[in-house]
Amino acid sequence: MPTRWRDAFDAVVDVLLPPACAACDVVLPGPQGFCDDCAHEVLELPTVHCRRCAEPGSFERGLCSRCVSGVPWERAWAPFEHEGSIAKSIHRFKYEDRSDLSRPLGLLLAALAKKELTSMPGLLVPLPLHEARFRERKFDQAGLLAAVVGQRLGREVKADWLSRTRDTRRQVGLSEAEREANVRGAFVASAAVRGQDVVLVDDVLTSGATAREAVRALTAVGAARVFVLTLARARSELESGD
Ligand SMILES: [Zn+2]
Ligand SMILES: [Zn+2]
């Protein structure tokens, strides 16, 4: 859609669907994402974090122990910590059938990631759900977020460049080794990825096991550089290096 139509379309959507707080549904005067109360419960990613995976904390040479032993992407980044109102709104979005929240959350991600994305070249590729999970949820949260970010920032989205060939258990409650085993070989990438820079998009990065496996599938078919962008970064249980 040309930009002038897109802006007009956005204005119409904003009138038809008055913006509401993504965490508590209170109606807002503008599309700022959260009401004042919930905005107090939003935690931005601390400025001191691992430079490869955004794990909050101070680490020797800026790299957490996981990234020192190798990570398949160039850089992963998220504007928020997975806490408070952000965690609450992501939960509503994914597990309470609130696909409409892709818009405020996607707009927030686009606005806050704009600067970071200037040094993350490449097309946006959402981290896909398995078809069985997609049928159950009826939407793919990473795909919806990537679509809003792509539209807002004028970056192409390639949702068919990566697919999930195997359904996997939810990673919640699994140890890191179990997470790795759970997602091993779960993704396959299109040959169209060869030579391309990619920004993998998802809602939350936790241990990174799923994203690492997705990145391996992309690099296996010859992706150039792969970056990871998520709305939120969950703290994993790494020891701070200082
Ligand atoms: Zn609220
Ligand atoms: Zn790291």
Image: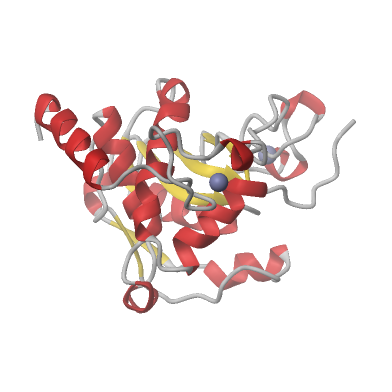
| Residue 91 at x, y percent in the picture | 54, 60
Give the total number of marks visible in the rendering. Answer: 0
Looking at the image, is 143 positioned above or below residue 232?
Answer: below
Position of 51 with respect to 24 (left or right) is right
The coloring applied to the image is secondary structure
Looking at the image, is 222 positioned above or below residue 170?
Answer: above
Residue 225 at least partly seen: no
Q: Residue at x 37, y 42 (%)?
A: 19
Using the image as rendered, state which of residue 40 and residue 168 is in the foreground: 40
Q: Residue at x 40, y 43 (%)?
A: 104
Position of 171 with respect to 100 (left or right) is right
Q: Residue at x 53, y 68 (%)?
A: 183
Residue 150 at least partly seen: yes
Position of 47 with respect to 222 (left or right) is right
Using the image as rendered, state which of residue 89 and residue 63 is in the foreground: 89
| Residue 2 at x, y percent in the picture | 9, 29
Looking at the image, is 37 positioned above or below residue 182?
Answer: above
- Among the 4 quarters of the image, the one containing residue 181: bottom right
Using the image as rendered, state which of residue 101 and residue 14 is in the foreground: 14
- Among the 4 quarters of the image, the one containing residue 105: top left
Q: Residue at x 24, y 56 (%)?
A: 160
Looking at the image, is 125 positioned above or below residue 137?
Answer: above
| Residue 204 at x, y percent in the picture | 55, 51
Q: Furthest residue to the right?
A: 242
Say which quadrant the N terminus sits in.
top left
| Residue 77 at x, y percent in the picture | 55, 35
Say which quadrant the C terminus sits in.
top right
